[in-house]
Amino acid sequence: MSLTCRIHGARDLRLETDPDAAPLAPHEVELRLGAAGICGSDLHYFLHGKVGAFVIREPLIPGHEASGIVMRVGEAVTRVQPGMKVAINPSHPCGHCDYCRGGRDNLCRNMRFLGSASVYPHVQGMFRERFVMGERQLTPVSEDISLGEIACAEPLSIGLHGVNRAGPLLGKTVLITGGGTIGCMSVIAARLAGAAHVIVSDIADRALEMAAAVGADSTVRADQAPPDALADVADVSIEAAGSPAALATCLAATRRGGRIVQVGTLPAEGVHFPANNIMARELDYVGAFRAGIEFDWAVTCLRTRRVDVRPLMSAQLPLDRAAEAFELAADRTRSTKVQLVCES
Ligand SMILES: [Zn+2]
Ligand SMILES: [Zn+2]
């Protein structure tokens, strides 16, 4: 028997006991949870029972940012062995649609993404003690890197993908709106890509402190700065707040001929968009959705400590305190990345 965390609807999180897994298929692996980060989308499911258009229609096990320990392997498994620590890629592209074949598998037509209500039946996630995963989702990590850090591979991959969509950053000034986990991962990624100066704006002091801790060169309280404080300051802007005000900041801050990357999820309706800036200033406005090959890059960055995400890891709570962990994660004044862990 093992413990599982399920969301049945808005603010209806239940801890349930599930039977042990059935025999494994040849390429399946049974894992014990190492650490699993609570992401903004998990919080939306918890608080509202939905993320944008993705509504919970059956109990959903959230969780898509996790690491694990291999417990059992199917007879044909070659990538991992029992006892290994692994990074887990939550993205299951089909591998045969036109986008997958074209090298943009994050845009797969048949994507199954763990812990998401985007399809029905929902794809169940990893906020549970034990789960089964295909071996192709797993990357063993032999280095002395904690399970909590390994679980940051997915949010780091989002930062890397956003920067990949930004084009060359060497020597450039980059503005990142939002100093939450994804904004901070974008700071890390922009520095890796050679940005000369990284500015972060947010409306919370703690977020700006975190951004500085992972390498932002300057930080701005967007709600307190004079209106033109950020005008024309950046070659590239990365919108990681998911806020219309932050998007407006990016439109004003990005120099003529520059680029804005939309990483955050904006409200589904009612966004005022000063689109003539795109035309008159010849801005490129591009989207970044989840990640592809960048997941593997993220694992490599973490295992070598090429980047250090530890300042962002604000708390770890055992799985049986999941409700408390969600409340903590929802409080931006106290936390950046809150993780659920499994100790036994
Ligand atoms: Zn996430
Ligand atoms: Zn596909």
Image (cartoon, grey):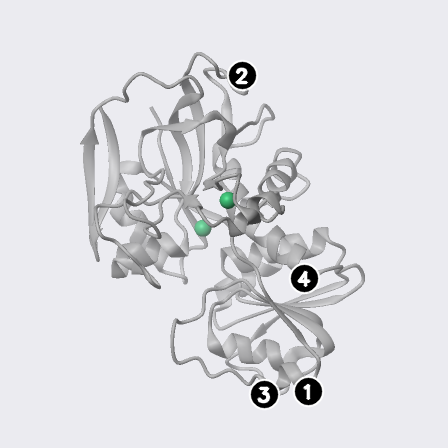
Kind of residue at disc 1:
Ala
What residue appears at the point 61 percent right and 79 percent down from the top-left corner?
251
Q: How far apart are marks 2 and 1 (CA)?
A: 55 Å
Q: Picture quarter containing residue 73?
A: top left
Q: How far apart are marks 1 and 4 (CA)?
A: 20 Å
Q: Earlier in the sequence, mark 4 or mark 2?
A: 2
- Disc marking residue 242: none
Mark in the foreground, 4 or 3: 4
Q: What residue would you read off at disc 4?
A: 166
Q: What residue would you read off at disc 2?
A: 78
Q: Is residue 178 visible?
A: yes
Mark in the foreground, 1 or 4: 1
Q: Which of marks 3 and 1 is nearer the N terminus?
A: 3
Q: What residue would you read off at disc 1?
A: 280
**Mark 4 and mark 2 residues within 8 Å of each other at the beta carbon:** no
Mark in the foreground, 2 or 3: 2
Kind of residue at disc 4:
Ala
